[in-house]
Image (spheres, rainbow, N blue to C red):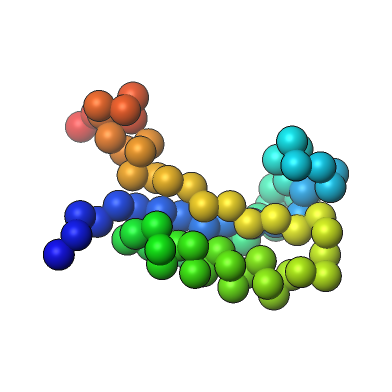
Amino acid sequence: MSQQLLHLVIGGELTEVRPDVHEFKDFGAVEFVGAFPDYESARMAWKAAAQNTVDNAHMRFFIIHAHKLLDPANGGPQG
């Protein structure tokens, strides 16, 4: 069994359609797609969410590597 690595998938409409802008238009409307134990299952959920909103150029979904934020060796919180 492989090590569980927490990944979160979120998305929402961005303020601008540019690859360097990651600001949500309405932070209260950010969609939480889910929490996943590995990158591959997070990627599959990300892909499905992105495909469902393909007609909206402002909509973007992201995979957050939460396991890196939780690891004290990588600067995450301790205890």
User: What residue is rendered at 76% in x and 69% in y?
Assistant: 54
Is residue 15 among what the camera can see?
A: no
Quadrant in which the N terminus appears: bottom left
Task: Point out residue 68 in the picture as x, y percentages from the top left corner.
Answer: 35, 38
Closer to the camera, 15 or 52? 52
Vertical arrangement, residue 73 with respect to residue 34, above or below? above
Closer to the camera, 64 or 24? 64
In the picture provided, is 40 more to the left or to the right than 51? Answer: left
Q: Quadrant of residue 66?
A: top left
Labels in figure, total: 0
Return the residue found at the far left: 1
Is residue 51 among what the camera can see?
A: yes
In the picture provided, is 18 more to the left or to the right than 22? Answer: right
Vertical arrangement, residue 59 with respect to residue 68, above or below? below
Q: Quadrant of residue 53?
A: bottom right
Task: Point out residue 62 in the picture as x, y percentages from the top left corner.
Answer: 58, 52
Quadrant in which the C terminus appears: top left
User: What residue is rendered at 49% in x and 69% in y?
Assistant: 44
